[in-house]
């Protein structure tokens, strides 16, 4: 079978160029962050590292991370366009972040998994904090 689809490229996000596509992903998944574009843009601009997946200039995936650049990395907002899921894009985005903060230099990489996404993170070799005898605590406005 032949395909006319262009390849999906993974690269560092350029907020000026990619923000319209990025917020489109938040909207496509009904995430409330999309309701306040200025606030979302601030969040992305202040992230330590952000990556996009593009197909023919369309943003089809996004992920970002916050880090102290020494010990800790918090990974957030991994989003793949509904019509591009289960093609390895999410895995490649997360791997780009994990590789950017290698475990031989960093102490831990953490994230909060949405319901239904646990299996995805397990496939990437991540484990629940309870595996280390730890408990994660959270305060949330939602
Ligand atoms: C979760 C999400 C990012 C996964 O992205 P994706 O591009 O579809 O995932 P991939 O194709 O890279 O999948 C990698 C592996 O995880 C598996 N996988 C993907 N989504 C999964 C899920 N929800 N549950 C269990 N396994 C999953 C795939 O089958 C694949 O397995 P393999 O290693 O055997 O091939 C995507 O479904 C998404 O955007 N969901 C909505 C937003 C969301 O919930 N994000 C997570 C926030 S915590």
Image (cartoon, rainbow, N blue to C red):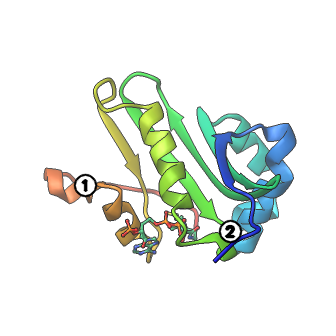
Rendered image quadrant of residue 5 = bottom right
Q: Residues within 10 Å of mark 2 (few under 14, many from 20)?
A: some
Disc 2 within 8 angstroms of ligand 1 (CB): yes
Which residue is at 47% across, 57% downward?
Answer: 91
48 relative position to 60: left or right: left
Closer to the observer: label 2 or label 1?
2
Q: Please identify the quadrant where the C terminus is shown.
A: bottom right
For label 2, the residue is 81
Q: Please identify the quadrant where the N terminus is shown.
A: bottom right
Q: Residues within 10 Å of mark 1 (few under 14, many from 20)?
A: few
Question: Which is nearer the eye, 129 or 98?
Answer: 98
- Compared with 86, 45 (above or below) is above
Alpha carbon separation for disc pair 2 and 1:
28 Å
Element at label 2: loop
Give the image location of residue 61, x and y in percent.
66, 58
Element at label 1: helix
Which residue is at 35% across, 71% downward?
Answer: 119
101 relative position to 122: left or right: right
47 relative position to 88: left or right: right
- Compared with 98, 29 (above or below) is below
Q: Residue furthest front?
A: 1
Which residue is at 63% across, 43% downward?
Answer: 51
86 relative position to 10: left or right: left
Which residue is at 70% across, 42% downward?
Answer: 44
For label 1, the residue is 129
Give the image location of residue 105, x and y in percent.
32, 23
């Amino acid at each position: 079978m032949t395909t006319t689809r262009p390849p999906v490229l993974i690269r560092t996000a350029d907020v000026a160029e990619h923000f319209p596509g990025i917020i489109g992903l938040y909207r496509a998944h009904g995430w409330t962050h999309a309701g306040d574009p200025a606030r979302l843009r601030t969040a992305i601009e202040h992230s330590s590292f952000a990556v996009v997946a593009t197909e023919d200039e369309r943003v089809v995936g996004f992920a970002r991370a916050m880090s102290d650049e020494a010990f800790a990395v918090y990974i957030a907002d991994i989003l793949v366009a509904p019509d591009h899921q289960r093609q390895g894009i999410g895995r490649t985005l997360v791997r780009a972040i994990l590789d950017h903060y290698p475990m031989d230099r960093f102490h831990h990489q953490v994230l909060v998994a949405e319901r239904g996404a646990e299996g995805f993170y397990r496939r990437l070799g991540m484990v629940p904090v309870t595996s280390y005898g730890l408990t994660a605590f959270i305060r949330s406005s939602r």
